[in-house]
Image (cartoon, grey):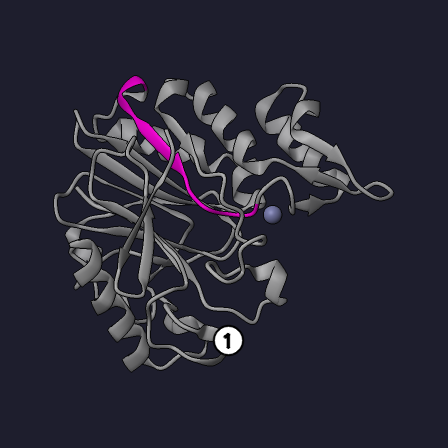
Amino acid sequence: MPFERHTAGALEYYTAPVIEMPHAFTTRLGGVSSGHLESLNLSIRRGDTEENVRENWNRLQKATGLHLEKAVYARQIHSNLVHVATSADAQAPWLEPRFECDGFVTNEPGLPVIIFMADCLPVLLCDKQNGVVAAVHCGWRSSVADILGNAVQKMRSLGAKPEAISAAIGPGIGKCCFEVGPEVVKAAESLLKADISDLVRKGEGDRAFLDLKSVNAKRLEQLGLDPKRIAVSDLCTMCHPDVFWSHRKTNGHRGVQAAIIEI
Ligand SMILES: [Zn+2]
């Protein structure tokens, strides 16, 4: 099932119809930030002003209808740590984060959980039937440390059932651009305990191009999700620097987009 692109004035974001709860994958378009943060930068931690970041969140709230006055989000550390979020954890999303982790799970209605990215893969999970959602930041380090395994386990602890969970792997660096060393391929292989030669294209010397989106999709299948309920965006952040921030394309001079979900 393809992702859907939405526009509200200059602001653009994506949703995945497989996710049956309010959610969004943002782009860099439609905000007020300038310079290398032009324009919908959503983090106070990239050198932006609080005023700009707050206005960007306000615009996103108007465009999406998500309840973004208060949300749960973290300083992300490429770990496999997933936190079960409650309303006591929430604060305005333009403030300094209160947590250090790379994923959130919640079963509280009206509580958006957010992860930030600029090449790393955003993964949103949703069990509508049992009322549990998750947002997970899947760079390669978190992916091979099985952050998705932790997220699904924490969803189960709140009553979710793997066969009832839908997943969307949003815009992020694609197999066209994600060049890695052999240690990353090896780590992905150990995660899946399977031959992944179909997900690897040879690069120069010992370098390779890894299809990290498919690695994560396979992991979700191993965790019990129905492959028909896993949507994967074919949009590559590095191939589309006009629409998305890419850490690799900009050598780190960039803002961040976000993936958000709430019940
Ligand atoms: Zn690409």
Q: Residue at x 47, y 19 (%)?
A: 222
Q: Residue at x 21, y 68 (%)?
A: 58
Displayed quadrant of residue 126: top left
Of 137 and 97, which appears nearest the observer? 137
**Number of marks in the image?**
1
Q: Residue at x 63, y 19 (%)?
A: 194
Q: Quadrant of the N terminus?
A: top left
Q: Is residue 119 left or right of residue 181?
A: left
Of 4 and 55, which appears nearest the observer? 4
- Rendering coords of residue 230 (x, y %): 39, 27
Answer whether residue 166 is magenta in the image: yes
Question: Which residue is the site of mark 1?
Answer: 36
- Rendering coords of residue 171 (x, y %): 46, 46
- Rendering coords of residue 157 (x, y %): 26, 29
Residue type marked 1: His
In magenta, the rendered stretch is 163-173
- Rendering coords of residue 77 (x, y %): 49, 55
Q: State yes or no: Cβ of the residue under disc 1 lies below 8 Å from any atom of ligand 1.
A: no
Q: Is residue 143 left or right of residue 70?
A: right
Answer whether residue 195 is magenta in the image: no
Q: Is residue 18 visible?
A: yes
Displayed quadrant of residue 251: bottom right
Of 120 and 143, which appears nearest the observer? 120
Tell me: residue 120, above or below residue 213.
below
Q: Is residue 75 left or right of residue 118?
A: left
Q: Residue at x 57, y 37 (%)?
A: 212
Q: Is residue 184 left or right of residue 57?
A: right
Q: Is residue 90 visible?
A: no
Tell me: residue 46, above or below residue 124.
below
